[in-house]
Image: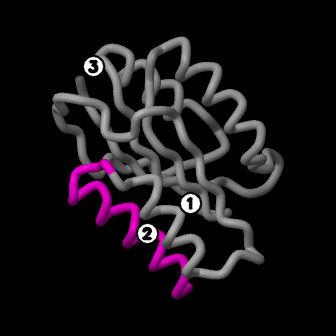
């Protein structure tokens, strides 16, 4: 089983990013592919962990790469895992009205069972966006 973590930037303009639509499509596609993980969207950037069988993670990531709603995809890690660290699919969205500490707390909950380096990546991301 593999876990892939990437970051990307949302593209503004003609294709607005709707977190609700992304969540619906992700749940449907990921359930079919037996992909689990976490997606954090702060209104500007996506940080996502995908977990599953190698072929399914690859196919899912290719689909994500073709999505015109974001650009500049960078793989932060790709590693073998013995068991799923995220359990079931999750998506967190930072509401602009939400305080920074609430966002960091939600990230900590989402990543509680993840490897320390994955947890640190998500928590750092939430803190950086809080400071911005």
The answer to which of marks 1 and 2 sits earlier in the sequence is 1
| Quadrant of the snapshot with the C terminus | bottom right
Camera-side residue: 114 or 75? 114
Nearer the observer, disc 1 or disc 3? 3
Which residue matches tag 3? Answer: 54
- Residue 65, position as x, y percentages in the image: 49, 34
Instruction: Verify whether residue 75 appears in magenta.
Output: no
- Residues under labels 3 and 2: Cα distance? 26 Å
- Residue occupying the point 65% across, 57% down: 93
Instruction: Verify whether residue 127 appears in magenta.
Output: yes
Element on which disc 2 rests: helix
- Residue 85, position as x, y percentages in the image: 31, 39
Q: Are marks 1 and 2 in contact (CB under 8 Å)?
A: yes
Camera-side residue: 34 or 68? 34
Q: Which residues are magenta?
A: 113-132
Which residue matches tag 1? Answer: 45
Disc on res. 113: none
Q: Are marks 1 and 3 in contact (CB under 8 Å)?
A: no
């Amino acid at each position: 089983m593999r876990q892939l973590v990437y970051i990307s930037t949302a593209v503004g303009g003609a294709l607005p990013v709707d977190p609700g639509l992304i969540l619906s499509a992700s749940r449907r596609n990921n359930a079919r592919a037996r992909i689990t993980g976490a997606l954090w969207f702060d209104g500007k950037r996506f940080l996502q962990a995908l977990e599953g069988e190698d072929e399914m993670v690859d196919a899912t990531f290719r689909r994500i790469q073709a999505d015109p709603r974001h650009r500049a995809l960078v793989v932060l890690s790709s590693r073998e895992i013995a068991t799923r660290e995220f359990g079931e699919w999750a998506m967190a969205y930072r509401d602009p009205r939400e305080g920074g500490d609430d966002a960091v707390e939600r990230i900590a909950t989402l990543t509680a069972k993840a490897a320390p380096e994955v947890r640190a990546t998500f928590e750092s991301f939430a803190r950086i966006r809080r400071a911005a």
